[in-house]
Amino acid sequence: DASDIEKGTYPHYMLKEIDEQPLVMRKIIQKYQDVNGQLNVDTEIVNAVNEADRIYIVACGTSYHAGLVGKQFIEKWAEIPVEVHVASEFSYNMPLLSEKPLFIFISQSGETADSRAVLVQVKELGHKALTITNVPGSTLSREADYTLLLHAGPEIAVASTKAYTAQIAVLAILAAVIAEANGKALSFDLMQELGIIANAMETLCDQKEEMDTIAREYLSTTRNCFFIGRTLDYYVGLEGALKLKEISYIQAEGFAGGELKHGTIALIEHGTPVIALATQEHINLSIRGNVKEVVARGANPCIISMKGLEEEGDRFVLPKVNEDLTPLISVIPLQLIAYYAALHRSCDVDKPRNLAKSVTVE
Ligand code: G6P
């Protein structure tokens, strides 16, 4: 498979798994492409999604964050409405379902009890379910009607990295296939773009020293940290904050750039690190406005922008990729920054306190 369970020369599984992301992207391209280079997803799955009037994505933790990004692809490209739900809430507070719902469970392990509880409920109601998982034969895979595999190889570190980008890539492929089947072909070649992304991921994985410096500069002594972004950058910020919390124990929160002023900005003090993502042209001005608001309150800003949108003073510039797909690369510096922050604070990167790789209790 894409990964060997050994750590090899790596000090931690997490770093090894971050580095495997370009390889996993290429593996996914290969697995979801037919001999003619066309997108290849089981027709049964395509039909099931196409028959749905609304898609319900259900997941936990990092997989939930991947679901938020996936919603954008499915709504924008395939034009099917999507709701994304945290599994533990859904099971006790089920929303009013549409007439022909389709459920997508996203789970690296395929064993998460909160997600399984929802799967059991919706199967009882007679609905169809697709599981997107890294583990063939896992409970969620066996109990759902359909499965799409991540092909990411075993993920050992508790903090999920390569599974997140694999989930986003597979959701993109699914959305593109559905769009195509409905005569709404994308204006770009997704597989070609994913190839470009694999290369960009490699470039980013080669910039570890820079991420180490950023982590040292912003996070070695701080009590808290905020991540801001708008649209896709907001969702990636949620994941960046989760990574940082999980392994460095720094209190970190992701916020929609425009929402900060409605309360949370009260927490900004002199020197508070604010990591801002700016990868989307249509909101570049407004996120930069949000950065100015926090800087005016004393924040220490770390702007991560994308080539073409960069401005003087940005701390890091990502290679240019298709704007719809930026989460696949903008998350990498955030994963690495979290990793180095945890190292600087002498935390156990692969086995953070209180957390388990797969949570099999509700
Ligand atoms: C646990 C892990 C998280 C993970 C979540 C969902 O809480 O610590 O890293 O995102 O479960 O796991 P799943 O296997 O369902 O993706």
Image (cartoon, rainbow, N blue to C red):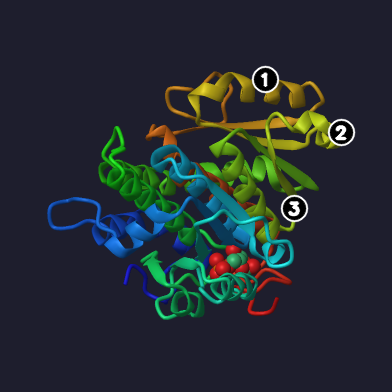
Q: In this view, does 51 lie above or below 124?
A: above
Residue 160: x %, y % from top left: 54, 62
At 28% from the left and 44% from the top, the residue drawn is: 180
Q: Quadrant of the C terminus?
A: bottom right
Residue 339: x %, y % from top left: 59, 56
The answer to which of 63 and 211 lies nearer the viewer is 63
Judged by depth in the image, the label closer to the viewer, 3 or 1, is: 1
First of labels 3, 2 by sequence position = 3
Q: Is residue 254 visible?
A: yes
Q: Is residue 340 visible?
A: no
Q: In this view, does 52 lie above or below 287?
A: below
Question: Which SS class for mark 3?
Answer: loop
Q: Distance between the residues labelled 3 and 1?
A: 26 Å
First of labels 3, 1 by sequence position = 3
Residue 289 got which mark?
A: 1
Q: Using the rendered view, name the quadrant where residue 270 is placed.
A: top right
First of labels 1, 2 by sequence position = 2
Residue 264: x %, y % from top left: 82, 37
At 34% from the left and 54% from the top, the residue drawn is: 25
Residue bearing mark 3 = 250
